[in-house]
Image (cartoon, grey):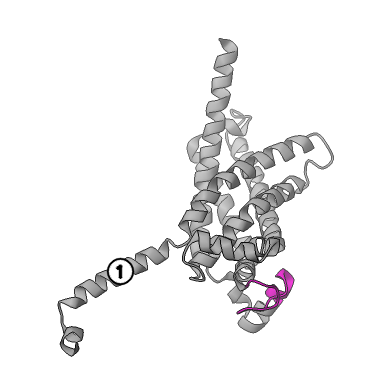
Amino acid sequence: PEHSMKDPSLRPRSRAADAANAARSLYRGLTPQLVGVVPIALVYMPSYEVASGALKGTPLQSTPIAGVLTGVASAVVRVPVSVIKSRIQLGLHQSAGEALSHARRGGRGGLYAGLRATVVLDTSYAVVQFTCLEQLRTLALRFSGGELTDPTQLGTKANAAIGFATGLFAAVATEPIDVVRTRLMTQGAKGVGAFAYDGLAHGLAKASRAEGMASLWRGLLPRLVTKSTGSLVWYTTYMEARRAFNAARRTSADG
């Protein structure tokens, strides 16, 4: 046994196993995230289009109400996915099924742990994102010199730049809420666990007091990368699909 512990031939195998485990740990929570992408995508932009369309021509058109409604709709769909994903990523559970079973035993509060914080996060994110989106689209149309009059006429590069910038701004503005929301989801019951937060406001105050204001932007860089890149892909894909749909509809009408 002593000889086998020192056997150099076992070291490469051990290193390979460690590397494989490290690689797997980077993708913990991927399955529920992939499953949750579809319903979240189906809710997010269509909710904004419906809400903003309903408010068009009313005194509420220039208010952030459309973004708020979009954030609420998104949070209701996203929270269960985020709860399961966060618990797997932190190693509290080994599989999505185990995390789901544990969350369901906690009742609606278990599966929807951190719902209020997520509603605040998603509404804040949506308000910032869509405000930036509208401003940048207006700016892009203005720079066209009057040649373009509708956002669907903007090219792929312009849409990609708009999507990237909106994701960047929204991520920076909402990072403190996301940090506390993630901690609320993983601590389980209110007021207990590693952080013992009673809610979003208590968590923000306690984290800034105990760890410093900078702690509220901890992990900002990876979130900047994921949010800006994700927003680029999301918005560009959406606008290209919308342009293709409009073109197909015009072709059908002409035929």
- Measured along the vertical axis of the image, is residue 116 above or below residue 53? below
Q: Position of residue 250 (x, y in %)?
A: 58, 18
Span colored in magenta: 188-205
Image quadrant holding the C terminus, namely: top right
Hey, which quadrant is residue 216 in on the image? bottom right
Q: Seen in the image, is 179 located left or right of residue 62? A: left
Q: Residue at x 64, y 61 (%)?
A: 111
Q: Is residue 204 magenta?
A: yes
Q: Position of residue 105 (x, y in %)?
A: 64, 65
Q: Residue at x 63, y 76 (%)?
A: 213
Callout 1: helix, strand or loop? helix
Q: Seen in the image, is 137 located left or right of residue 222? A: right
Please tell me which residue lies in front, 54 or 92. Answer: 92
Asked if residue 25 shows in the view, the reply is: yes
Q: Position of residue 167 (x, y in %)?
A: 57, 53
- Measured along the vertical axis of the image, is residue 196 above or below residue 23? below
Please tell me which residue lies in front, 255 or 85. Answer: 85
Amino acid marked by disc 1: Ala
Please tell me which residue lies in front, 45 or 128. Answer: 45
What residue is shown with label 1? 19
Q: Is residue 63 magenta?
A: no
